[in-house]
Amino acid sequence: MSTFYEYLIEEFGYDEPILVQDVVMKTGDSQGTVRQRLRRLAQDDKLIRVQNGIYFIPSKKSKFGKPIIDPKKVLNKKYLYRANQVSGYQSGLNFGNRLGLTTQTASVQTIVTNEASRYQRIVQIYNNKIIIKKPRVAVTERNYKFLQVLDLLNDFDDYSEKTLQSSKDTIASYLKDIDLTTEERKEIITYYPMKTQIRAYEVGVTQSEVTQ
């Protein structure tokens, strides 16, 4: 067991999320074996269990109960980046706020991710609740910004305090560095409702060079 523990330290480090599925992939061991080993280390207080299937190795002991890990690290590792590839993105009201289209923020953030097994569910990391949604199109490094904008356009009246036309330059600026052809954009848009498709054409995001 100590050898496995040392392997985890070397492979994942301290205060970083350790996902069962990642250990399975790296070691080639069965999921049952990995879960059992991690569970034993947690029972020996060498690992801390965050939630089902997620652990971390604390760098130091806490005087005020069990150590905790930064929830953002767990969110990034499990839902936003898998194998160092973009697998999810922020959506909803907080994304609209990030673009400056609204002054409002949501206490429960929305994440769209390839890791979602169904359309929508709520997960909790410590006291942080997060809405996890399945994407209409598989998320990649190349398309995630475009999908963010389409999600925004889909619920534009709920997420923006500005008109669609007055938001056009902001949206164009956000998409200026994406590498999607006009054909790829038009294909992705077909997975969205007609109202979203119409809005996408109105703000010009269907073209590989967004109309300013």
Image: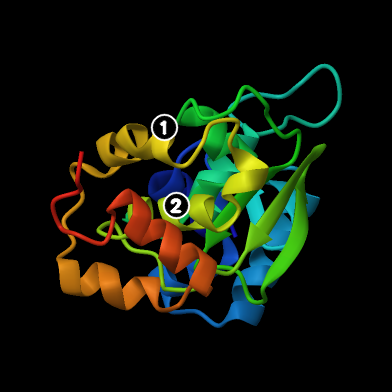
Image quadrant where residue 139 sits: bottom left
Mark 1 vs mark 2, CA separation in Å: 18 Å
Q: Which of marks 1 and 2 is in front?
A: 1
In this rendering, is residue 210 above or below 194?
Answer: above
The secondary structure type at the circle numbered 2 is: helix
Image coordinates of residue 117 in percent, x first then y, are 63, 76
Q: What residue do we see at 18% from left, 74% from top?
A: 183
Which is nearer the N-term, disc 1 or disc 2? 2
The image position of residue 40, as x and y in percent, is 74, 60
* Chosen colour scheme: rainbow
Q: Which secondary structure lies at badge 1?
A: helix
Inspect the image, locate mark 2, and give the three-letter code of the amino acid beneath it. Gln
* x 43%, y 64%: residue: 198
Q: 177 left or right of 188?
A: left
Viewer-nearest residue: 114 or 189: 189
Residue type for callout 1: Ser
196 vs 119, left or right, is left
Q: In this view, does 84 lie to the left or right of 19?
A: left
Quadrant occupied by the C terminus:
top left
Disc 2: which residue: 148
Residue at which label 1 appears? 166
In the picture provided, is 140 more to the left or to the right than 147?
left
What residue do we see at 35% from left, 73% from top? 188
Residue found at the very far top of the displayed protein = 63
Label 2 crowd (10 A; few <14 / some 14-19 / many >=20): many
Residue situated in front as seen by the camera: 143 or 114: 143
